[in-house]
Amino acid sequence: MAIETSVFVNDAWSSEGMAHELASRDGFYLVATPDVDDTRIVGYSGLMVLPGAPDADVQTIAVLPEARRSGLGRALMGQMIAEARRRGVREVFLEVRADNPGAQSLYESLGFEAIAVRPRYYMPDAVDAVVMRLQVPATTTEPAGPTIETSESEQLP
């Protein structure tokens, strides 16, 4: 909860709300640490995907200020998008504070587009939420360069 309350000063989730989300069978949550030897949590993200639903919702993403601009937020979002694709989701939605252009820019760079505004969504400071949507590509783009050939029984995930 330390990251939650430091990143979302005025609109942090409660401990009870966070515990409920983490206990949900429909959630997909990730935590990020600096490396295998340093297990401090410096970021986390959560995605909600109801069974059989064609869409998913980014519930939360937070990265400590000192860990920002290192690609961590992009990596967390990439993993959530990959999980959405794995579950057959066609669209991913999120809400982002209208006064957070850095996050909006990250989401746009990942293919999200603004589709609506929810006035006075974030309380108590009455900040609008920008609703964004990603049309999930059916497959990932193949990277340029050498590829690894595997037999069917040895295929990588």
Image (tube, grey):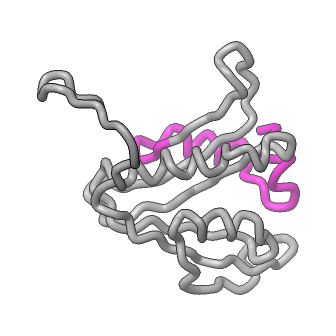
Quadrant of image for the C terminus: top left
- Compare residues 31 and 104 and report the one nearer the observer: 104
Q: Residue 48 in the image: state x and y as whole percent.
A: 46, 54
Q: Indicate left or right for 105 with 149 as reference.
A: right
Q: Residue 3 in the image: state x and y as whole percent.
A: 79, 41
- Compare residues 92 and 36 and report the one nearer the observer: 36
Residue found 61% across the figure and 39% down from its top: 19
Q: Indicate left or right for 54 with 11 as reference.
A: left
Q: Is residue 44 above or below residue 131?
A: above
- Is 151 part of what is drawn in magenta? no
Q: Residue 42 in the image: state x and y as whole percent.
A: 75, 35
Q: Is residue 34 above or below residue 141?
A: above
- Is 23 part of what is drawn in magenta? yes
Quadrant of image for the N terminus: top right
Where on the picture, by quarter, is residue 59? Answer: bottom right
Residue found 56% across the figure and 48% down from its top: 46
Q: What range is drawn magenta here?
A: 1-28
- Compare residues 126 and 15 and report the one nearer the observer: 126
Residue found 29% across the figure and 56% down from its top: 139
